[in-house]
Amino acid sequence: MEIETKNASLDTLAVTIRALHVSGKQMTLAVFKQLPELAAFTENGELGDFEPWGTVRYAIKDCADRWLVASKDGILYRCSLRIDWPDSVDARRRDFDSIRKTLLAYEEWQKAKIKYDLLYEEWKKRPDRNAFDGMPREPYPPNRCRWEIGDQCYRDRFIESKLKLEKAELIEKTMLDINRLPQLFIAV
């Protein structure tokens, strides 16, 4: 689609800038850096127990480049909005794929275990099961303890993956709420 320049125009719009002031003066970056830090998210990924004021885009080396300004108990804080795991669509897709593969592996494990249990029951019914004619004493795997260890391993991996995904989804929802907050201007 081509748009001719005679049909296009530039308009000037009003912009609202929200500046953070302390004692009647605009907050500077030096003062912003001195604000005490507070964790933005709780252990389960929810927003912390404070009143959010807005966000500030300012990179502090080895910390974050986006901050949430919030107040708690009458004190102003800065909260890092840096998330420790990748939040890209591809990373979330990999997390979903990882959980799906873990679930499928667990289902295959359960099927193999049921098959083994049936073979084991059949083997126990055989009159020659204790014969020493080169036949194995038990169907593979001989150690039933391996099944229980494997069960626990798969269950733990599945639960861990599911909890990680739930936390990521909650933080993603919380970040959408944070993105609706005003962006605050800090003086240089």
Image (cartoon, grey):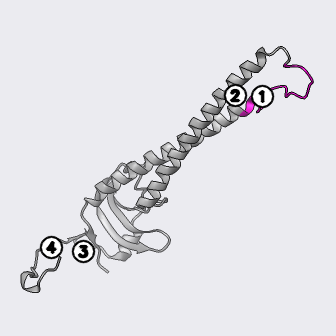
Labelled pair 1, 2 in contact (Cβ < 8 Å): yes
At label 4, the amino acid type is Val
Instruction: Compare marks 3 and 2 and give the one earlier in the sequence.
Output: 3
Q: Is residue 48 above or below residue 65?
A: above
Q: Residues within 10 Å of mark 3 (few under 14, many from 20)?
A: few
Q: Residue 34: x percent and y percent?
A: 41, 70
* The C terminus: image quadrant: bottom left
Specify start and end residues of the magenta stretch as a single range: 129-146
Q: What is the secondary structure assignment of the residue under circle 4?
A: loop
Residue 54 image-quadrant placement: bottom left
What secondary structure prevails in the magenta region?
A: loop
Query: What mark, if any, has residue 116 been given in the picture?
Result: 2
> Is residue 167 magenta-colored?
no
At label 1, the amino acid type is Pro
Q: At 56% from the left edge and 36% from the top edge, which residue is drawn? A: 107
Q: Is residue 116 above or below residue 122?
A: below
Q: Residue 66: x percent and y percent?
A: 37, 67
At label 3, the amino acid type is Lys
Q: At 32% from the left edge and 58% from the top edge, which residue is drawn? A: 70
Instruction: Compare marks 3 and 4 and give the one earlier in the sequence.
Output: 4
